[in-house]
Each structure stands twice: as C-alpha cells, then as structure tokens.
Image (spheres, rainbow, N blue to C red):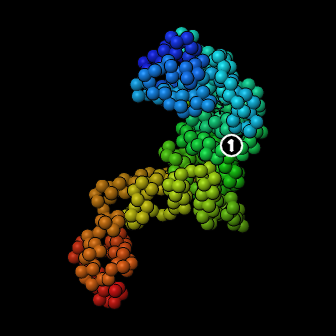
C-alpha cells in the first residue's frame, strides 16, 4: 500500500507528533490509498483535543466545525484538514447520536467506533498502517463489513445502513452477508434518522459509478428509504419493445444516464407509476397508460420528504413528466424554447437511456437522440429564436402599430413567437410587423 500525502498533510502530522500527540490519517483517505486511488481529502485523528490542536497550530486558522464531537478544521496552506480527537462513543439511546462523546487517548478505541472495517484503518509515516479489524484484507476483497456486531452498530446509528449502500454504489464493494442481514433487519431505524441525512446519502449513492449494480444487488436497503419504489420490483412488462421487468429496466436506464443528480433521480422514478397503472390485453400484453403523472407524484413526494432542493425537484418533475414525449427535428426548436438548453439536453439524455434499457431493436435507435442533442446545441450556438427577446420586433413596435399596452400586448408577442417556432413566420422585422398589422386590422387583437 502506498500513501504519499501532500506536504501540508505530512507537516501537520509531524507538528502534532512533535508536540507529543499521536496523529494519524484515518477514514476515506486510507481506504482510497488501499485501493490505489488518490484521496480527495485527508482526515486526521489525534490524541490532541481541539484546544491542544489550536496550540499546536498557533498561526493557522482552526475552525470549530464540530467541536462538541472533537472535530476542528485546520486551514493548512489553503487546504482544509479535519482533525478529530480520538473518541470512544458512549451509549446511543436515540439511534443517531451518542449520548456522550468521551475523548480517548488511543487510536484503537477510535477505530473501534467507526462503521466499516475498510473505514477503520489509520496510517502515519512512522507507525505505518494500524488495521485492527482486517480493513486492508476487506479492501482487497472489496467487501463492506461492519466493525463489531453489525446489529448493535446499526442500532446505535441507522444512518450507517445507508452509508453502506452509498459506499457500495461508490466503490462497487459487496456487503458481507451478516452485515447485510443486519442492515435489512434494522432498516426500520432509518425513521429516526434526519431526512436531510437520508437524502444526502441517497444522492451520493445515486451518483456513484456502481449505483445500478449495487441497487440491483441490495434493493431492499434502498426501498427502506424509498418505499414508493418497491412495487416496481417484479412488475412485468410483456410487450414487444420491452425486454425486462420495470425494476430491471429502471436500473438499466439509471446505468445509462450520466452522473447528474437530476438525471439519476429522474431515471429512478420515471416508471415508478407503472405498477399502479398496469393493464393487460387478453393475450397478456401489458400496458401502463397514464403512468407518467403518477411517477411525477411519487418523485415529488419522495424528494420533498428527503428535503431535496426545490430547483432539483422542479427539474426532475419536468424530466419524469416528459420522458415519453416525442421530440424530433420538427419540434426541436419549440421544445428548446420551452425547456431551455440544459433541461432539454437532460431530457434527451434520459430518453436515450430509456431506449437503451429496452429491447435490442429499440435500443438500436438511441444514437438518433445524440444527433438531436447536437442539433439543439447548434441552434443555441447559431442564435436561433428561442424566446421573446430573440424576436425581431418588440413591444414598442406593436404599440407603434396601434396595439394597446397591457396583457394583450404580451399575448400578441407570444403568438408571433409561436408562429416563428412553428415555422409559419420568418423572424424578420417586416414579416412580423406585417403579420401583426394584419391581425390588428382583422380585429383579432386590440
Ligand atoms: P468520503 O471519501 O466520501 O469522504 P469517508 O469514509 O471519508 O468517505 P466521511 O463521511 O468523510 O466518509 O467519514 C469519515 C470517516 O468517519 C469514515 O471513514 C468512518 O471511519 C467514520 N464515520 C463517518 N460516519 C460514521 C458513522 N455514522 N458511524 C461510524 N463511523 C463513521
Ligand atoms: Mg472523508
């Protein structure tokens, strides 16, 4: 295993050591190093208390980011490093927070309170790796295993159940069977965890590169947080253009979307309304007429419950509602005008993923949508008419023609825009003025 932290990290470890404290790198960065990856950030654990950390770094800004739990953040040469005092957590009676935090002087006690063996290793340049729970072997075997008795650990803190799912989605690790059984048995404890925290872990899970694989392997854990998805499991789709049941199709769509939060949520929920809308032909062929509206409602309520930001929820709502809309060269500009470039491109990416999760002959058509995405981007680049401000006439022009100020003026401009988008009018000043004058004279507008 190679851990070659940047200079500011080594200097901080040495400064703590020089002042007589024990200091280690812990958590994600040690795990990443075991996996041969470059860590994104470096967390430290030390025998120094927050006040002692301040004394060791008198010229450094030290922020009290979680001081009650022994965590401060030192800004070392512009880099934030979390330094947490060794802890040995007291009993948990609320399933989320230890009743009291006891600072500890040994790293072993600190590692014992951590969630999974791969997260319970410590390293520093002079002692090398401290690995009391076999985290390194589990890293190599790509296994998530609770530290200690899994049921006890998930009862202490049910958020760990979703952390395991999230880590499986991020790392592609399997969950050790006893750990998994305990996760499923203790999943009811998630009700005691704050919804923001649940939402945060779900977001990180969905963005993970192995999300579809992990959710296929451990669907029950996801359903504990998002029960509205469960009916999709085993809902059949018996119709020519589908090859999978609704849940497997959903996972394939998820897998085929880029790592974007709105797209991943939309992929997860786009067909969630199907189980409630299933109908059968006499020959057993399935239909799901009108499922989009139910999918929208389910996505909305789940995302609101998990405290997702409003803008994200809005975008997911649009993507889910329109996932079956027909978009082609003839209405591309209109769709672009209505949705804006960002959302339209995401909708096309969702539709592309949706196709690629269907029967092979449907999936073969997915690249057609790539061409549409390029067309949409070209329209934007070439300054195509997309909104009122792109129109070759404005409100003042219509006033000069004799239109009256007020809502009718806006409506008249809208009509001109729609005619241009539909290709019935050219976006030229003379053509637009002529059309507006004609309408005024025909008495259609005043
Ligand atoms: P990432 O790379 O995503 O930051 P991480 O493992 O560092 O992954 P953090 O949330 O930063 O995740 O947590 C840092 C460490 O703190 C973990 O590796 C783990 O040892 C410990 N930890 C975090 N949350 C818990 C928890 N709920 N219960 C027990 N230990 C935890
Ligand atoms: Mg971390």
Q: Which of 123 and 74 is in front in this view?
A: 74
The percent position of residue 76, horizontal first and vertical second, equals 44, 24
Is 103 placed left or right of 375 in the picture?
right
Quadrant in which residue 284 is drawn: bottom right
- In this view of the protein, can residue 361 be seen by the observer? no
- In this view of the protein, can residue 265 be seen by the observer? yes
Q: Which residue is rendered at x = 65% and y = 44% of the image?
A: 194
Mark 1 CB within 8 Å of ligand 1 = no
Across the whole image, how many numbered discs are drawn on residues? 1
Q: Which residue is rendered at x = 57% and y = 35% of the image?
A: 170
Instruction: Indicate the quadrant containing the N terminus: top left, top right, bottom left or bottom right.
Output: top right
Is 409 placed left or right of 251 in the picture?
left
Provide the secondary structure element on which disc 1 rests: loop
Tell me the crowding category of disc 1: few under 14, some 14 to 19, or many 20 or more residues within 10 angstroms, Cα based: some
Instruction: Indicate the quadrant containing the C terminus: top left, top right, bottom left or bottom right.
Output: bottom left
Q: Nearer the viewer, residue 301 or 342?
A: 301
Q: Nearer the viewer, residue 48 or 307?
A: 48
Is 88 placed left or right of 24 in the picture?
right
The percent position of residue 254, horizontal first and vertical second, equals 56, 47
Q: Which residue is rendered at x = 59% and y = 50% of the image?
A: 307
Q: Mark 1 points at which residue?
A: 193
Is 339 placed left or right of 227 in the picture?
left
The percent position of residue 190, horizontal first and vertical second, equals 71, 43
**Rendered position, 122 above or below 90:** above
The percent position of residue 183, horizontal first and vertical second, equals 73, 37
Q: Nearer the viewer, residue 271 or 88?
A: 88
Q: State ligand 1's quadrant.
A: top right
Quadrant in which residue 78 is drawn: top left
Q: Which residue is rendered at x = 66% and y = 27% of the image?
A: 114
């Amino acid at each position: 295993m190679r851990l070659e932290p940047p200079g500011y990290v080594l200097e901080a470890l040495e400064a703590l050591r020089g002042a007589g404290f024990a200091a280690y790198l812990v958590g994600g960065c040690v795990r990443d190093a075991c996996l041969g990856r470059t860590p994104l950030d470096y967390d430290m654990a030390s025998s120094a208390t927050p006040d002692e950390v301040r004394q060791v770094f008198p010229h450094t800004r030290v922020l009290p980011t979680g001081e009650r739990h022994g965590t401060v953040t030192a800004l070392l040469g512009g880099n934030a490093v979390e330094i947490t005092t060794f802890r040995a957590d007291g009993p948990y009676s609320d399933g989320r927070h230890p009743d009291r935090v006891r600072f500890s002087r040994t790293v072993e006690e600190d590692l014992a309170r951590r969630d999974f063996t791969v997260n319970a290793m410590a390293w520093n340049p002079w002692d090398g790796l401290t690995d009391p729970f076999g985290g390194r072997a589990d890293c190599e075997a790509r296994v998530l295993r609770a530290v200690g008795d899994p049921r006890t650990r998930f009862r202490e803190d049910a958020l760990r159940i979703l952390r395991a799912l999230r880590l499986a989605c991020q790392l592609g690790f399997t969950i050790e069977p006893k750990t998994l059984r305990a996760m499923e048995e203790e999943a009811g404890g998630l009700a005691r965890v704050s919804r923001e925290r649940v939402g945060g872990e779900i977001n990180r899970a969905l963005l993970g590169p192995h999300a579809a694989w992990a959710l296929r392997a451990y669907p029950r854990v996801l359903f504990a947080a998002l029960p509205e998805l469960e009916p999709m499991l085993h809902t059949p789709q018996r119709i020519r253009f589908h090859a999978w049941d609704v849940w497997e199709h959903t996972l394939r769509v998820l897998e085929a979307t880029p790592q974007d939060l709105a797209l991943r949520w939309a992929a997860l929920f786009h067909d969630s309304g199907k189980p409630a809308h299933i109908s059968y032909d006499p020959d057993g062929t399935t239909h799901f007429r009108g499922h989009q509206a139910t999918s929208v409602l389910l996505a909305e309520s789940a995302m609101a419950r998990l405290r997702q930001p409003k803008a994200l929820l809005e975008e997911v709502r649009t993507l889910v509602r329109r996932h079956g809309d027909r978009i082609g060269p003839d209405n591309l500009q209109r769709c672009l005008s209505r949705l804006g470039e960002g959302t339209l491109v995401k909708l096309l990416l969702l539709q592309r993923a949706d196709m690629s999760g269907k029967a092979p002959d449907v999936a073969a058509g997915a690249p057609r949508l790539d061409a549409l995405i390029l067309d949409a981007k070209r329209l934007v680049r070439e300054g195509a008419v997309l909104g009122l401000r792109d129109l070759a006439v404005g409100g003042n022009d219509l006033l000069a023609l004799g239109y009256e100020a007020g809502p009718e003026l806006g409506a008249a401009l809208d009509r001109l825009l729609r005619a241009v988008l539909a290709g019935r009018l050219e976006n030229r000043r003379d053509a637009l003025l002529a059309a507006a004058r004609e309408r005024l004279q025909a008495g259609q507008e005043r």
